[in-house]
Every structure is written in structure tokens, then in C-alpha cells.
Image (cartoon, grey):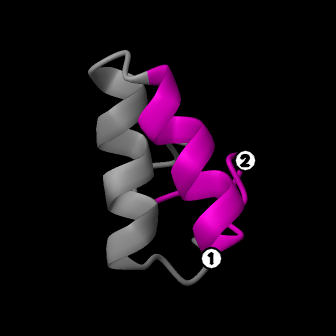
Amino acid sequence: MQSQDWSRSDERLLQAVEQKEADKVSALIVKKNLCPTKLDTEGKSA
């Protein structure tokens, strides 16, 4: 399995999901135009 380009913003999105910070998740997706289904190197997505 090949991971997509993973950025610092994607990492922050995943951390916000893990910490159940819904407002931060929404803000990151909108402001940074992130894809919540992007996979990291371990195959995890937000």
C-alpha cells in the first residue's frame, strides 16, 4: 500500500480527531483544504 503525501497539517488533523476536538477538525479541513480520508504511512486516516 502506498501512502499519499502526508503533511504537518494532516498530522494535526489526525491528532484533533484522536482528541475529539470537533471544532479544530472542522477548522483544519476548511482552512487547510484537507482530505479526512487521506492515509498516513500506517494506513490510518482522520
The spot of residue 2 in percent (x, y) is: 62, 73
Asked if residue 4 lies left or right of residue 28, the reply is: right
Q: Is residue 18 above or below residue 20?
A: below
Residue under label 2, please give it. 37
- Mark 1 or mark 2: which comes first in sequence? 1
Secondary element under disc 1, as helix, strand or loop, is loop
Asked if residue 20 lies left or right of residue 19, the reply is: right
The amino acid type of the residue labelled 1 equals Gln
Q: Quadrant of the C terminus?
A: top right
Front label number (1 vs 2): 2
| Structural crowding at the residue carrying mark 1, measured as other residues with C-alpha within 10 Å and reported as few (<14), some (14–19) or many (≥20) | few
Residue closer to the observer: 29 or 36: 29
Whether residues under marks 1 and 2 lie with C-beta atoms below 8 angstroms apart, the answer is no
Residue extending furthest toward the top:
20
Q: Quadrant of the N terminus?
A: bottom right
The spot of residue 10 in percent (x, y) is: 46, 63
Mark carried by residue 31: none
The amino acid type of the residue labelled 2 equals Thr
Stretch of the chain drawn in magenta: 22-41
Secondary element under disc 2, as helix, strand or loop, is loop
